[in-house]
Every structure is written in C-alpha cells, then in structure tokens.
Amino acid sequence: MTTATTTKTAASPLSAILFTAMLGTGLVFMLGVAQSQTLHDAAHDMRHATGFACH
C-alpha cells in the first residue's frame, strides 16, 4: 500500500517583501514623481494601442 504525500509550498517571505517593495516604489514614482502630462501621454498611447478611441 502506498500513501501519497502532499507538500505545500509557500512563497518565501523574501519574495513577498521584494514584490511589495517594487510595487511601492512604482506607486511612489507614478503618484509622486512623474509629471501629470507624462502619465496622461502614457494612458493616451495605451488607449490607442488597445484599440479604444479617446477623441
């Protein structure tokens, strides 16, 4: 008789910390450092790239 063993793998705490740090850095840049015109242009270009008309 064989028994199946299951192993649970959890993401390491270090990868969670790194992901959170990168996300936080990106948010700080987007919300605090980037010019509003830069953000507008990026959103505008993405709308055209995905096929949405915006004007």
Image (spheres, grey):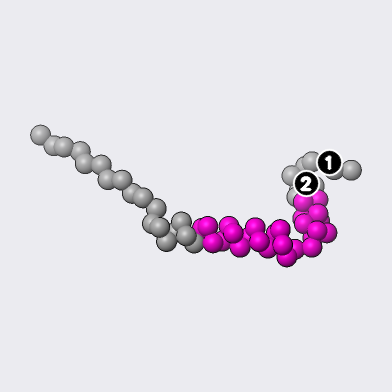
Q: Position of residue 23 (x, y in %)?
A: 58, 57
Within 10 angstroms of label 2, few (less than 14), some, or many (20 or more) residues? Answer: few
Provide the secondary structure element on which disc 1 rests.
loop
| In the image, residue 22 lies in the stretch drawn in magenta | yes
Task: Kindly identify which numbered label has been placed on residue 53.
Answer: 1
- Find the residue positioned furthest to the top: 1
Q: Which of the 4 image quadrants contains residue 52?
A: top right
Q: Quadrant of the N terminus?
A: top left
Q: Mark 2 near mark 1, Cβ–Cβ under 8 Å?
A: yes
Alpha carbon distance from label 2 to label 1: 7 Å
Q: Residue at x 78, y 46 (%)?
A: 47
Q: In the image shown, does 52 or 41 lie closer to the viewer?
A: 41
Q: Position of residue 31 (x, y in %)?
A: 71, 58
Task: Kindly identify which numbered label has been placed on residue 1.
Answer: none
Residue at the disc numbered 2: 47
Q: Which amino acid is tagged 2?
A: Arg
Compared across the picture, whether 8 is left or right of 33 comes to left
Over which residues does the magenta segment extend?
A: 19-45
Within 10 angstroms of label 1, few (less than 14), some, or many (20 or more) residues? Answer: few
Q: Does residue 51 lie above or below 12 as drawn?
A: above
